[in-house]
Amino acid sequence: MEKETKCIQGGYTPANGEPRMIPIIQSTTFKYDTSEDMGKLFDLEESGYFYTRLQNPTNDYVAAKICALEGGSAAMLTSSGQAASFFAVFNICGAGDHVIASSAIYGGTYNLFNVTMRRMGIDFTFVDPECSDDELNAAFKPNTKAVFGETIANPALTVLDIERFASMAHSHGVPLIIDNTFATPVNCRPIEWGADIVTHSTTKYMDGHDASVGGCIVDSGKFDWFAHADKFPGLTTPDESYHGITYAEKFGLKGAYITKATAQLMRDLGAIQSPQNAFYVNLGLESLHVRMPRHCENALKVAEFLEAHEKISWVNYPGLKNNKYYERAKKYMPEGTCGVVSFGVEGGRAAAERFMSGLKIAIIATHVADAHTCVLHPASATHRQMKDEELVAAGVSPDLVRLSVGIENVNDIITDLKQALELV
Ligand SMILES: *Cc1c(COP(=O)(O)O)cnc(C)c1O
């Protein structure tokens, strides 16, 4: 199937007489005839459902659709994008381990790594995604377990050289984890470029309508855990909490990583998406391939308008020909990047705030990447915990305004921007 068909039909094929639409299985528990039947599920001897804290059929249908879109081998939904980032990393490392992350990542992920996961004893090195190969190489340590980056960074809008990061990670025997939230699998499939694990905040374009918070993790099934068995004992040695099964042995390379994340992390931490929210994500996925091209088309027109405006000091959009990442974006995302544009208003922070308060169609919201046009000043909102030098390292200047271009009529959006700029 092509991606458009996968958006509509992937992940769920009803049998004779079953509902056409993915059903919402709004049930915490599942019934079994004998204790033995249920025991087999608890032992991971058979696959099936017993408690929605770990797994639910609605979620699995939707995860299977995202898995098909990304070209992965297995996937799971999580309660949020934050939970997806946390699980994706924590599934393969623990106290005493080390992870390399691009410094140009989402502010929430940066805090998760740099503050909360450090408190768990995991060490992080943040590298400039444009650093030299030598610098990247030098960031690896004997205890490094993963490399993490974003296809298009939120909000810096830098485009990661996924192939380079993948080959560097692989030469050190560790997987590359890519947060593909902004590009979505409609525009970029990181697994085709060497990524091993892909994460999403489904809250953004996948849901696409401001309706539900959620996340997803997709495993490519390609990383050979056994080839680096000493680095990944959690996958290659027996799990005593499941009667000594070894995930990579019992579930193979295609299933081990997601099964472990479900069986251990969901069991113990329970950050599962509600089936109702998974249903909304599926509705969004069905039109994702129609919405993404429109987001990109509108964003390009808005970026061109802003670029020509005298009160705008700079515009950053990887779809603009003069953008630093234009060529790389064309390679990884030939059909378009995303709907998010960032820019600076002449006059800095105060001018940006005046401009934003004059907007009528573009609303101020701590959100991006959905049907409604919205705008945010990261330095005073999502990134306010970061110091100025951390902001700069993350590619976020204090005057940066992030505009998420929706799929309204683009002339209305531009008219709105125009009148708000007149007030500055
Ligand atoms: C929003 C976002 C997240 C976090 O997702 P939530 O669903 O808000 O928890 C992670 N990564 C990126 C790139 C995001 O834009």
Image (cartoon, grey):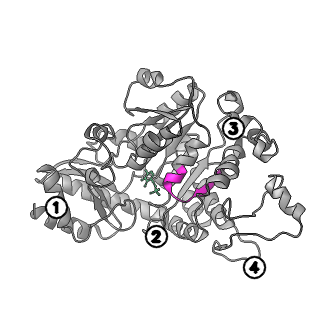
288 or 109, which lies in front?
109
Q: Could you tell me residue 240's position as x and y percent?
A: 78, 42
Q: Extreme front residue here?
A: 119
| Residue receiving disc 2 | 211
Query: Which of marks 3 and 4 precedes in the sequence?
Result: 4
Q: Amino acid at mark 2?
A: Ala
Crowd rating for badge 2 (residues with CA inside 10 Å; few <14, some 14–19, many 20+): some
* In this view, the mark in front (4 or 2): 2
Identify which amino acid the numbered label 4 is placed on. Gly
Separation (CA) of disc 1 from disc 3: 51 Å
Q: Earlier in the sequence, mark 2 or mark 1?
A: 2
Residue 14 % position (x, y): 71, 71
Residue occupied by mark 4: 17
The answer to whether the residue labelled 1 contacts the one labelled 4, judged by CB atoms less than 8 Å apart, is no
Residue displayed at 77% across by 40% down:
246
The amino acid on which the numbered mark 3 sits, given as a three-letter code, is: Gly
Label 2, label 1: how far apart the Cα atoms are: 27 Å
Left/right of residue 304 with respect to residue 132 in the rendered view: left
In the rendered view, tell whether residue 378 sits above or below residue 390.
below
| Magenta segment | 74-84
Extreme residue toward the bottom, this view = 17
Camera-near label (4 vs 3) is 3
Q: Which residue is mark 3?
A: 234
Earlier sequence position, callout 1 versus callout 3:
3
Find numbered disc 4 in the image and state the secondary structure of the residue it sits on.
Answer: loop
Earlier in the chain: of badge 4 and badge 2, it is 4
Cβ atoms under marks 4 and 3 closer than 8 Å:
no
SS at badge 3: helix
Which residue is rendered at x = 19% and y = 65% of the image?
357
Quadrant containing ligand 1: bottom left
Badge 1 is on which residue? Answer: 355
